[in-house]
Amino acid sequence: WIALSLGDGDSDWERDDETKDSEFYLNPRFVHHTDEVFLTVLRQFLEDNIHDGSSVLDLMASWVSHLPENIEYERVVGVGMNEEELRHNPQLTEWEVQDLNEEG
């Protein structure tokens, strides 16, 4: 499996808005949560490390998965916070609504 390190300190994980994620994502947003520079780097990294026939678990999925489109995936499973956004994601073969910050 592939792990991508994001951030190098505790402050990288502090949130500006402490509202529960289930409330924040209650309504669909259909916005990109990252900038184009990051997406370009991410897609290149994924393209270099994921190959045709791979199965992918997309945590924090939404209406887009940011996966390279030139790869034929066996399966793309999305776990996200908003059902409507997940239903609109064309790369997902299946999905589940789940708040990973909550137990149960």
Image (cartoon, rainbow, N blue to C red):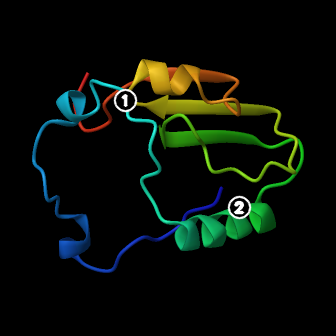
Q: Secondary structure at mark 2?
A: helix
Determine which quarter of the picture holds residue 15.
bottom left
Give residue 86's position: percent from left, percent from top.
52, 26
- Residue at screen point 80% across, 48% down: 69
Q: Label 1 neighbourhood size at 10 Å, few (<14), some (14-19), many (20+)?
A: many
Query: How many numbered marks does the figure carry?
Result: 2
Q: Residues within 10 Å of mark 2 (few under 14, many from 20)?
A: some
| Distance in Å between CA atoms under marks 1 and 2 | 23 Å
Q: Is residue 96 above or below residue 15?
A: above
Q: Residue furthest left?
A: 18
Tell me which corner region of the image, top left, top right, bottom left or bottom right, holds residue 46.
bottom right
Q: What residue is pinned by disc 1? A: 81
Q: Is residue 17 left or right of residue 47?
A: left
**In the rendered image, which quarter contains the N terminus?**
bottom right
Q: Which mark is residue 73?
A: none
* SS at badge 1: loop
Who's the residue at 54% across and 70% down the image?
A: 38
Residue assigned mark 2: 46
Tell me where residue 9 appears, x and y as whole percent. 25, 78
**Kind of residue sitting beneath label 2:** Leu
Q: Earlier in the sequence, mark 1 or mark 2?
A: 2
Residue drawn at x 27%, y 24% is 26
Q: Is residue 34 left or right of residue 67?
A: left
- Type of amino acid at the residue the image marks with label 1: Met
Q: Quadrant of residue 99?
A: top left
Badges 1 and 2: C-beta atoms under 8 Å apart? no
The front one of 32 and 11 is 32
Using residue 3 as the reference point, say whether residue 53 is left or right of it.
right
Is 11 placed left or right of 49 in the picture? left
